[in-house]
Amino acid sequence: MANTPATMSMIFKSDQYGSELSWEVKEEVSGTVVASGGPYPDLTAAGVTTHPAVTLNTKLILGTCYKTVI
């Protein structure tokens, strides 16, 4: 299983203040950032928006622990 690619998908929702949302996926032991996103655009009025799905499929290794920091 070593070096076998794995896939992970994430969907983020934000309120009116998308500029306050950013995220990183890190390899837990080394702290290496394998993906990141945000900040996102603010809405012009109050509400909630769903951002496009993020799919990670080439940088993740099956059997390795990752953490998401939001």
Image (cartoon, grey):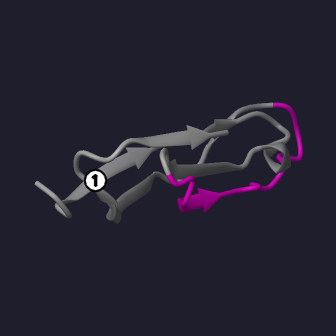
The structure residue drawn at horizontal position 51% and vertical position 40%, both measured from the top left corner, is 67
Is residue 1 one of those drawn in magenta?
no
Q: Secondary structure at mark 1?
A: strand
Q: Residues within 10 Å of mark 1 (few under 14, many from 20)?
A: few
Q: Quadrant of the N terminus?
A: bottom left
Q: Is residue 49 left or right of residue 21?
A: left
Amino acid found under the numbered disc labelled 1: Thr
Q: Position of residue 62 (x, y in %)?
A: 23, 50
In the rendered image, the residue lying farthest to the front is 29
Up the image or down, 60 lies above or below 17; here it is below
The structure residue drawn at horizontal position 88% and vertical position 38%, both measured from the top left corner, is 45
Q: Is residue 50 left or right of residue 63?
A: right
In this picture, which residue range is highlighted in magenta? 30-46
Q: Position of residue 32 (x, y in %)?
A: 55, 60
Q: Quadrant of residue 20?
A: top right
Main secondary structure found in the magenta portion: loop
Query: Which residue lies under the disc numbered 1?
Result: 7
Q: Position of residue 70 (x, y in %)?
A: 67, 39
Is residue 32 one of those drawn in magenta?
yes
Up the image or down, 68 lies above or below 3; here it is above
The answer to which of 13 and 26 lies nearer the viewer is 26
The structure residue drawn at horizontal position 83% and vertical position 46%, both measured from the top left corner, is 43
Number of callouts in the render? 1
Q: Is residue 63 left or right of residue 67?
A: left
In the rendered image, the residue lying farthest to the right is 44
The answer to which of 65 and 30 lies nearer the viewer is 30
The structure residue drawn at horizontal position 71% and vertical position 33%, both measured from the top left corner, is 48
